[in-house]
């Protein structure tokens, strides 16, 4: 990490610490004052397990649909089982220190860690469908290898790398501990999540929306697995502050909302943070004009936290967060399918939203009955949605038209 990167990392850590305090930001005559940060929600009195992204009812429905040959689960399952992550000969690649620079350069264990977490989750899903203990054993082997080895994450992308991996690990761990049930080293894995992963990201990192949303997702999942209400509430507080600052609604006023403590105090600063976009519309995100890939990371994390929250007893889909998610899905899928207007990103967008729409689409369209024409066209046209090899995996299988 060079000196400039080091100073930037220290700066964003300071911002993250400040974000824990609610403030009102004066943005000048062109922008309304930002509201104070919403209070952190209360964690459930009793945590539900499995309860990170997928519930037992959802897993049971997934299994029944695969066994009955029902689509889209059957095709999605076959796709998952044909991936390298489902191989019973998969070998984990644990490291004591995962060192990740910008864009994973250097890449010292970055890909290995993310893919091993995805493999553990894949193997746990394979076990749930087949009840073949070899898959559960493989998932345990992968998780035990890392819990016996990993000590730290370093370099400029340490927070994002930690968040991506820690978004996936609890999904696998929840299925193995609470559905499979035989895992002697589960306590060591829990210690790893707390001491290596949570300790790295608990201060958050607000340099871009997708970073902080992934951090929130990771913390929420860790909180569920550890049954730690303080950790869970920390993740949900970060999430509730960031979602309104990532997705614009016209009700926000002339300018998008900002995260309390962000330091964005003028119109020019906010527009700069929004990639130079000065015209705002419902569903535009803070990273739309960067590219749809990073926008998709943020949307995925928003939907995934909302799904975990629903399983834990607090349904956010009918709230402001759900409306922002609906608008973001519709806006981005529209311009994945059609040419953008001249006012949007200078008339050019970088497409590539990725496999990120199933969870939000299933919740908002299938459960709540909301018409989502563009999202529906994109989602059904990209099935089965597989893995982005970072932190999103197999959501057509787990959530595609899943009524549970």
Image (cartoon, rainbow, N blue to C red):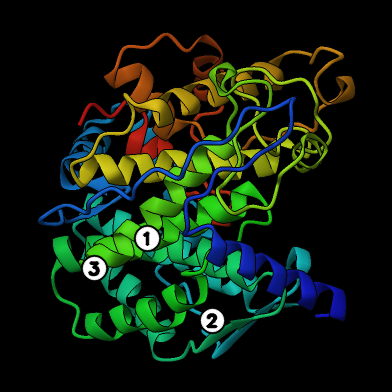
Q: Looking at the image, is mark 3 or mark 2 nearer the viewer?
A: 3
Residue visible at 16% across and 52% down in the picture: 44
Q: Secondary structure at mark 1?
A: helix
Q: Which residue is mark 3?
A: 228
Residue visible at 56% across and 26% down in the picture: 328
User: Mark 1 near mark 3, Cβ–Cβ under 8 Å?
Assistant: no
Q: Give the vertical position of 262 relative to 120 (above or below).
A: above
Q: Secondary structure at mark 2?
A: loop
Q: Nearer the viewer, residue 289 or 334?
A: 289
**Quadrant into which the C terminus falls:** top left
Residue visible at 23% across and 26% down in the picture: 403
Residue visible at 74% across and 26% down in the picture: 29
Q: Earlier in the sequence, mark 3 or mark 2?
A: 2
Q: Looking at the image, is mark 1 or mark 2 nearer the viewer?
A: 1
Q: Nearer the viewer, residue 273 or 395?
A: 273
Q: Which mark is residue 64?
A: none
Q: Which residue is mark 1?
A: 234
Is residue 381 visible to the viewer in this orientation of the structure? no
Give how far across and how far down residue 400 sits, in percent.
Answer: 37, 30
Q: Nearer the viewer, residue 30 or 219?
A: 30
Q: Secondary structure at mark 3?
A: loop
Q: Earlier in the sequence, mark 1 or mark 3?
A: 3
Is residue 9 visible to the viewer in this orientation of the structure? yes
Give how far across and how far down residue 86 sits, in percent.
Answer: 42, 60
Q: Which residue is mark 2?
A: 93
**Quadrant into which the N terminus falls:** bottom right
Callout 2: few (<14), some (14-19), or many (20+) C-alpha neighbours within 10 Å? Answer: some
């Amino acid at each position: 990490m060079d000196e400039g990167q080091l100073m930037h990392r220290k700066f964003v850590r300071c911002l993250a610490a400040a974000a824990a305090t609610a403030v009102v930001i004066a943005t000048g005559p062109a922008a309304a004052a930002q509201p104070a940060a919403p209070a952190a929600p209360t964690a459930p009195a009793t945590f539900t397990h499995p309860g990170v992204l997928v519930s037992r009812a959802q897993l049971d429905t997934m299994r029944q649909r695969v066994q009955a040959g029902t689509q889209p689960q059957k095709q999605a399952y076959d796709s998952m089982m044909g991936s390298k992550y489902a191989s019973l000969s998969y070998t984990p690649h644990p490291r004591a220190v995962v060192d990740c620079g910008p864009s994973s350069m250097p890449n010292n264990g970055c890909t290995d860690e993310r893919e091993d977490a995805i493999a553990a989750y894949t193997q746990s899903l394979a076990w749930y469908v087949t009840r073949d203990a070899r898959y559960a054993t493989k998932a345990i082997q992968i998780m035990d290898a890392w819990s016996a080895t990993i000590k730290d994450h370093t370099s400029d992308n340490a927070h994002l790398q930690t968040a991506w991996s820690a978004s996936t690990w609890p999904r696998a761990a929840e299925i193995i501990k609470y559905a499979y049930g035989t895992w002697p080293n589960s306590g060591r894995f829990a210690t790893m999540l707390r001491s290596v992963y949570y300790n790295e990201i608990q201060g958050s990192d607000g340099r871009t929306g997708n970073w902080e949303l992934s951090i929130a997702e990771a913390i929420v999942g860790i909180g569920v697995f550890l049954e730690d209400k303080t950790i869970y509430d920390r993740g949900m507080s970060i999430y509730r502050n960031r979602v309104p600052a990532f997705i614009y609604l016209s009700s926000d006023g002339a300018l998008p909302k900002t995260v309390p403590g962000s330091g964005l105090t003028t119109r020019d600063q906010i527009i700069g943070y929004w990639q130079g976009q000065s015209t705002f519309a419902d569903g535009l995100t803070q990273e739309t004009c960067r590219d749809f890939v990073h926008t998709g990371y943020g949307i995925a994390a928003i939907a995934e936290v909302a799904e975990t929250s629903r399983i834990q007893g607090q349904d956010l889909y009918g709230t402001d967060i759900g409306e922002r998610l609906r608008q973001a899905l519709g806006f981005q899928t529209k311009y994945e399918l059609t040419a953008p207007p001249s006012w949007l990103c200078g008339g050019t967008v970088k497409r590539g939203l990725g496999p990120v729409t199933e969870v939000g689409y299933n919740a908002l369209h299938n459960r709540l009955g909301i018409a989502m024409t563009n999202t529906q066209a994109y989602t059904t046209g990209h099935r089965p949605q597989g893995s982005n090899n970072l932190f999103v995996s197999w959501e057509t299988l787990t959530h595609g038209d899943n009524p549970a």
